[in-house]
């Protein structure tokens, strides 16, 4: 889910930016520092909306830059377990499919791609044995989050399933409804 939240941090403004508009300088530094920032508490920062407040800077000896206590708003993506998402299949391997979820990607194990026995039909295509449904690169799919790991904060792992009702390739869902 995307949400707006307020964060606080001490932001460093380099001496070469002292003559510029401080609002713009601090916003630029916050965006540079928080662009793509990922944490378990915040999620993945998509964009810094604005700087709400900042204090007068403090210069630390030996650095020359000023540090400002800053409060700013961000738009972040934080997925929750059992949350339904829509994404595009980026790649397919023998063990499953990788799906793009905006700024990150998730993985759907081959056993979770469809409610059928699945095998690699041809290069980069998964096919169900009984129902004949296929899954290939660039298919738009609906999946559900079943696992989230922040063991490596810079690269969170998102596990997905498409085996439940109303999940799977969007085109197939429309066919099933008819």
Image: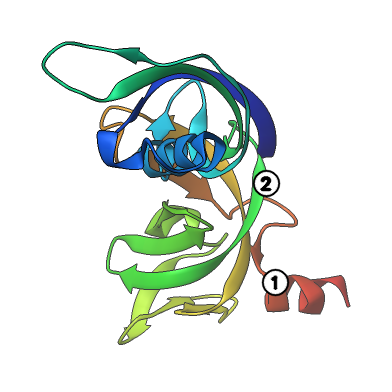
Name the residue at the bottom extreme.
Answer: 122
Percent position of residue 147, x then y: 46, 34
Number of marks present in the image shown: 2
- At horizontal 50% and vertical 79% (from top left) the residue drawn is 138
Camera-side residue: 87 or 163?
87
- Residue 105, by quadrant, is bottom left
Task: Give SS at disc 2.
Answer: strand
Residue under the image location 63 percent in, 35 percent down: 82
Disc 1 residue crowd, few under 14, some 14–19, many 20+, Cα 10 Å: some
In this figure, which residue is indicated by the disc labeled 1?
Answer: 170
User: With respect to residue 51, does 125 lie above or below?
Assistant: below
The residue positioned farthest toward the left in the image shown: 62
Where is the N terminus found, in terms of image quarters? top right
Position of 19 compared to 133: left or right? left
Residue at figure coordinates x 42%, y 71% from the top left: 90
Mark number for residue 84? 2
Work out whether residue 130 or residue 1 is closer to the camera in this orientation and state it.
1
Residue 40: give x, y in percent of width and height.
44, 24
Left or right, 101 with reference to 150: right
* Dot 2 and dot 1 residues touching (CB under 8 Å): no
65 vs 156, left or right, is: left
On-image quarter of the C terminus:
bottom right
Label 2 crowd (10 A; few <14 / some 14-19 / many >=20): some
Earlier sequence position, callout 2 versus callout 1: 2
Q: Dot 1 lies on which element? A: helix
In the rendered image, the vertical position of residue 80 relative to residue 137, given as above or below: above
């Amino acid at each position: 889910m995307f949400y707006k939240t307020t964060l606080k941090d001490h932001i460093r403004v380099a001496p070469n930016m002292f003559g510029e508009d401080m609002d713009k300088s601090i916003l630029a530094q916050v965006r540079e520092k928080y662009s793509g920032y990922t944490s378990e508490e915040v999620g993945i920062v998509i964009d810094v909306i604005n700087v709400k407040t900042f204090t007068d800077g403090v210069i630390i000896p030996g650095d020359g830059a000023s540090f400002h206590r800053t409060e700013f708003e961000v738009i972040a993506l934080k997925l929750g377990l059992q949350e339904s998402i829509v994404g595009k299949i980026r790649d397919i391997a023998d063990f499953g499919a990788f799906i793009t979820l905006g700024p990150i990607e998730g993985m759907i194990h081959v056993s979770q791609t469809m409610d059928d026995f699945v095998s690699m039909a041809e290069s980069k295509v998964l096919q169900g044995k009984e129902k004949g449904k296929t899954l290939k690169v660039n298919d738009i799919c609906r999946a559900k989050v079943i696992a989230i790991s922040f063991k490596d904060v810079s690269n969170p792992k998102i596990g997905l399933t498409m085996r439940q009702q109303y999940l799977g390739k969007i085109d197939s869902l429309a066919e099933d409804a008819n």
